[in-house]
């Protein structure tokens, strides 16, 4: 597998994108690909820069064996379009913002859920204003999309 980099993006980088970051990072580690896959996350907005992921996101992730405690929110920067091969948006709104920010010709933008079974839908819903079931649903969706992403990167690396 060739070296690649993935950036997960949501609004404030405290719920969905750090969850995707933590889940995918653990999958990358389990596959023995840490030296080949760089993983990070960011937000389209600066609402929570420097903060830890939402406590509810951390709690639900921890129950499944994912540690998000070391992550800190940051905002997407122009340099990210040079640093990351894949920038994966959690929803269409994020994708729209990222397309406006991307330099001409950047081809690494897409929805994260493109890597999940179509039955799950095209977007990861924001659990921030909902109850605990929303965080569980988000984890279910992210685990499936992350597994699909890892399969896709591994297959591309064999070509």
Image (cartoon, rainbow, N blue to C red):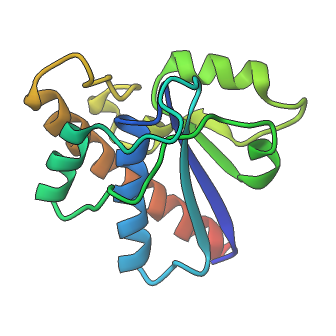
Q: Is residue 93 above or below residue 58?
A: above
Left or right: 134 as drawn, with respect to 40: left
Q: Residue drawn 36% across and 68% down? A: 26
Residue 76 position (above or below residue 20): above
In which image quadrant can residue 56 be found? Answer: top left
Q: How many badges with numbers are in the image?
A: 0
Q: Is residue 110 above or below residue 69?
A: above
Q: Which image quadrant for residue 17? A: top left
Query: Which residue is depicted at the point 71% across and 53% down?
Result: 85
> 49 or 34, which lies in front?
49
Residue 147 visible here: no
The x and y percentages for residue 28 are: 44, 71
Looking at this view, name the residue that lies furthest to the front: 50
Q: Quadrant of the C terminus?
A: bottom right
- Residue at left offset 9%, top offset 31%: 132
Percent across and percent down for residue 116 are 37, 43
Residue 80 percent location from the top left of the image:
74, 45
Q: Quadrant of the N terminus?
A: bottom right
Image quadrant assignment for residue 38 = bottom right
Q: Tell me, yes or no, if residue 36 can be seen here.
A: yes
Q: Is residue 96 left or right of residue 10?
A: right
| Nearer to the camera, 5 or 50 | 50
Q: Position of residue 14 (x, y in %)?
A: 39, 36
């Amino acid at each position: 597998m060739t070296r690649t980099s993935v950036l997960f993006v949501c609004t404030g980088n405290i719920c969905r994108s750090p969850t995707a970051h933590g889940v995918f990072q653990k999958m990358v580690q389990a596959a023995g690909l840490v030296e080949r896959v760089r993983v990070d996350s960011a937000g389209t907005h600066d609402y929570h820069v420097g903060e830890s992921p939402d406590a509810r996101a951390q709690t639900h992730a921890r129950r499944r064996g994912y540690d998000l405690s070391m992550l800190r929110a940051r905002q997407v920067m122009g340099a990210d379009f040079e640093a990351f091969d894949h920038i994966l948006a959690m929803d269409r709104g994020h994708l729209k913002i990222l397309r406006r920010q991307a330099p001409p010709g950047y081809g690494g933008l897409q929805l994260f859920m493109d890597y999940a079974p179509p039955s799950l839908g095209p977007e990861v819903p924001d659990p921030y204003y909902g109850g605990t079931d929303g965080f569980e649903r988000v984890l279910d969706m992210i685990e499936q999309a992350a597994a699909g992403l890892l399969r896709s990167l591994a297959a591309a690396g064999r070509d």
